[in-house]
């Protein structure tokens, strides 16, 4: 990171120096930020389009991405089949190939959350909620993590509706046409009916 600061200063002095731009790419690569590295290599190629070294580096990043993509696809299939530990192992391999692979990180949070939720104990459900929260922060446009957070809140305490309802409602709001929005709405409807029945029962007993 300190190297990046120094290279940024050098680039401001000589903004069209391909060697400096390439070094910035190398530094990003060393930090595991492959996408940022690729962008810098592409910038350097504008000035040295025939650079075999830079083209080789770009090809290696592309190869890592393609291999990681295959592993993520395989891991998602494992998640769908409820083989969470196997999915976690595959996703960790993907992240070794490309540490900044967003889909791999997201699905690792989901798989880890499912593994904790499977335990069913209160402490594990809190851990599951944390993992789903990390998935949501990484991909805030998706309903999936909110649906599973809602389920985990509900399992943790069936008498506490506020957090579960909030997550189900968020899932419906942010991705209304998705599978998880539909599941969230169904769950929300069921739990709202259940909540009303319980409230009516207890209120009847007070009269």
Image (cartoon, rainbow, N blue to C red):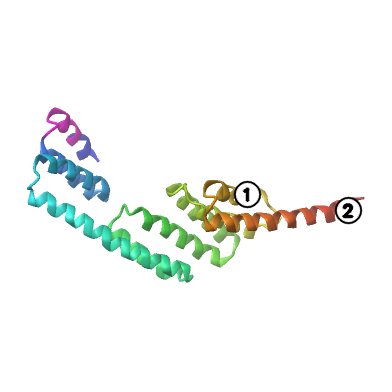
In screen coordinates, is 147 left or right of 75?
A: right
Q: Main secondary structure of the magenta part?
A: helix
Quadrant, the N terminus: top left
- Residue sitting farthest toward the right: 207
Identify the secondary structure beneath mark 1: helix
- Please tell me which residue lies in front, 55 or 131: 55
In screen coordinates, is 143 left or right of 40?
A: right
- Residue sitting farthest toward the top: 13
Q: Measure the alpha-carbon separation of dots 2 and 1.
A: 26 Å
In screen coordinates, is 56 left or right of 179?
A: left
- Please tell me which residue lies in front, 92 or 56: 56
What percent of the width, then of the height, locates residue 155?
63, 60
What percent of the width, then of the height, locates residue 74?
37, 68
What percent of the width, then of the height, locates residue 5?
22, 35
Task: Say above or below: 50 vs 69.
Answer: above
Q: Residue at point 27% right, 60% down? A: 66
In primary-sequence order, the first of circles 2 and 1 is 1
- Residue 204 is tagged as 2
Identify the secondary structure beneath mark 2: helix
Q: Residue at point 59% right, 63% down? A: 121
- Residue 186 is tagged as none
Q: Quadrant of residue 65?
A: bottom left
Q: Residue at point 68% right, 52% down? A: 160
In screen coordinates, is 161 left or right of 135?
A: right
What percent of the width, then of the height, locates residue 80?
47, 68
Is 8 included in the stretch rendered in magenta?
Answer: yes
- Residue 163 is tagged as 1
Q: How crowded is mark 2: few (under 14 residues within 10 Å), some or many (20 or more)?
A: few
Q: Residue at point 35% right, 67% down? A: 90
- Residue sitting farthest toward the front: 177
- Highlighted range, magenta: 7-16
């Amino acid at each position: 990171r300190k190297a990046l600061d120094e290279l940024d200063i050098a680039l401001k002095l000589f903004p069209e120096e391909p060697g400096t731009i390439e070094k910035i790419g190398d530094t990003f690569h060393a930090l595991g930020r492959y996408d940022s590295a690729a962008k810098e290599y592409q910038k350097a190629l504008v000035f040295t389009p025939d650079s075999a070294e830079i083209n080789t580096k770009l090809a290696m990043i592309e190869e890592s991405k393609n291999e990681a993509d295959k592993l993520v696809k395989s891991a998602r299939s494992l998640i769908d089949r409820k083989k969470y530990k196997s999915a976690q192992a595959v996703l960790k391999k993907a992240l070794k190939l490309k540490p900044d692979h967003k889909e791999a990180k997201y699905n690792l949070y989901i798989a880890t959350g499912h593994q904790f939720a499977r335990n069913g104990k209160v402490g594990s459900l809190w851990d599951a909620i944390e993992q789903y929260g990390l998935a949501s922060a990484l991909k805030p446009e998706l309903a999936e993590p909110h649906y599973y957070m809602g389920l985990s809140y509900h399992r943790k305490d069936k008498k506490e509706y506020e957090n579960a309802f909030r997550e189900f409602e968020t899932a419906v709001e942010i991705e209304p046409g998705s599978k998880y929005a539909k599941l969230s709405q169904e769950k929300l409807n069921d739990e709202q009916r259940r909540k009303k029945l319980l409230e009516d029962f207890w209120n009847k007993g007070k009269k």
